[in-house]
Amino acid sequence: MPDTICSPHTDEFNNAMDAEAWTFVDPVGDAEVQVDEAGVHISVPGGTNHTLWNSEYTLARLMQETENVNFDVEARFDTIPVGNIAQQGIVIEGIKAGKPHFLRLEFYSLGSGLYLYTGIFNDGENVGGSSTDINKEGSSISMRVQRQNSAWSVQYTFDGAAWSEGMTFNDTFEVTRMGVYAGNDGINPAYTATLRYFVNRHPSCPVVTPIIYNLEHLVEFGKVSLSWTTHTRTTWKIQYGKDRSYGEVLEGPSEALGHQATVSNLEPGQTYHLQVVVTDQAGRSTSSQDIEVRTPGAIEVWYGNHQTFGTPDRPQRWANILGQVNVPDIASLGYSLNGGALQPLKVGPDGLRLENTGDFNIELGYQDLTYRDRDLVAPESLLHQGLNALVIEATDQKGTTYRENVTVEWLASQARPTPWRWTGARLMR
């Protein structure tokens, strides 16, 4: 068997699919294929069979013409089959003794279980195969198929690092095409298989630059946490800054397949750009797309930093300034109005009006409140007509203070006498 020809070909599915290499085959006529930044999605609807069993060959599949050579391919799926029965895997077509010959190498679900299946079909009949259950780990899984002459090996991994031996068998035939697929059987649930990449690792093939996948980020106060996986062991660095020229670098020198990093000490309320760069043992590098984020402000004021009350009417005795403080380890929160003394604020959650962590509610009164209502409001919290300067101040346990300025405008008006008619009314604050 030749060891000098690379076939089939690698495709990273980076927002595109090699249309010259792949052909979409939809025997039933109701399947779909889509490509985006997450990979290739092959979808089959519920209610109809999409499978390979004896003479039925209705799998929705992407196929490549393949030389009859040795290979070592990996298909990385970012989906795990669920239901009774959902299917995804690798199908190999060929000729044996002048008759059609197929290998169905598959992850499938039955109830809550996950299984690995290898099936051999010749001239429309099942002539061999076996199935074994798999302990599910995570939301992604790879299948690796190695052919060395007539010897076949099927392995799988969830984390991309530790390969588990699935099946080994011997089968001699002429390979003509290979591909990946989605299918269903049993009660035929709708299912979408997402293929992140398809790689031929055989020594006859060009070495693939590192593939970055499952790149996710979480934005928090003053930091961005990232996680991603590479298909081979790499080091990494994260370039970041306030524009796409970046300027700052965070490096991770240890080689790994799964990566996590946190970019810290970012300014609150600012836009940042980040890019992940990974490098394999041979010095080949791959860069992710630019990631644009905005860090939470230290103090976020809902409805804006200029708020108007009293028009067209005054619906209640208070002017409420609502928001959220994102400062971790907060020691105190307060506000001052028109240069007055700092008034303390309660920070949510409190099980009452403040539902989420960091929520606050500033209640300001009006100078023309009745004496009875004035007793409920500190003099330092009374608005005067026109523009009022409100400063919200948060201090953390380290003594760092953050301030946010808000203009509160009171347009004097009197409460309307009852009865009220709400027909055609507009927002009143």
Image (tube, rainbow, N blue to C red):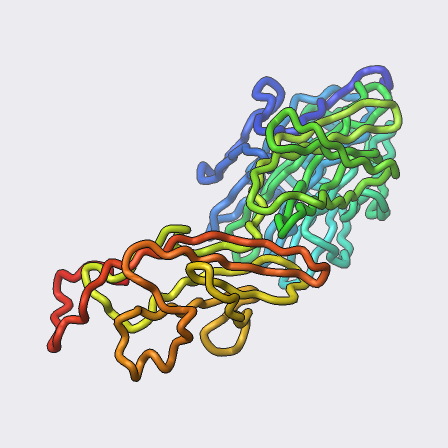
- Looking at the image, residue 240 sits to the left or right of residue 62; the answer is right
x and y, in percent, of residue 384 in the image: 31, 63
- Does residue 246 lie above or below 183 as drawn? above
Image label count: 0
Q: Residue placed at 16% from the left, 62% from the top?
A: 425
Say which of 327 and 69 sits in front: 327
Q: Residue 312 appears in which quarter of the rendering? A: bottom left
Q: Quadrant of the C terminus?
A: bottom left
Q: Residue placed at 37% from the left, 51% from the top?
A: 306
- Does residue 39 lie above or below 88 as drawn? above
Q: In this orientation, does residue 395 appear?
A: yes
Say which of 384 and 177 sits in front: 384
Q: In this orientation, does residue 101 appear?
A: no
Q: Residue placed at 61% from the left, 67% from the top?
A: 332
Seen from this angle, which residue lies furthest top?
4
x and y, in percent, of residue 409 in the image: 31, 56
x and y, in percent, of residue 68 in the image: 77, 21
Q: Residue placed at 52% from the left, 35% from the top?
A: 33
- Does residue 303 lie above or below 375 as drawn? above
Say which of 138 and 387 sits in front: 387
- Looking at the image, residue 166 sits to the left or right of residue 360; the answer is right
Q: Quadrant of the N terminus?
A: top right
x and y, in percent, of residue 10 in the image: 71, 25
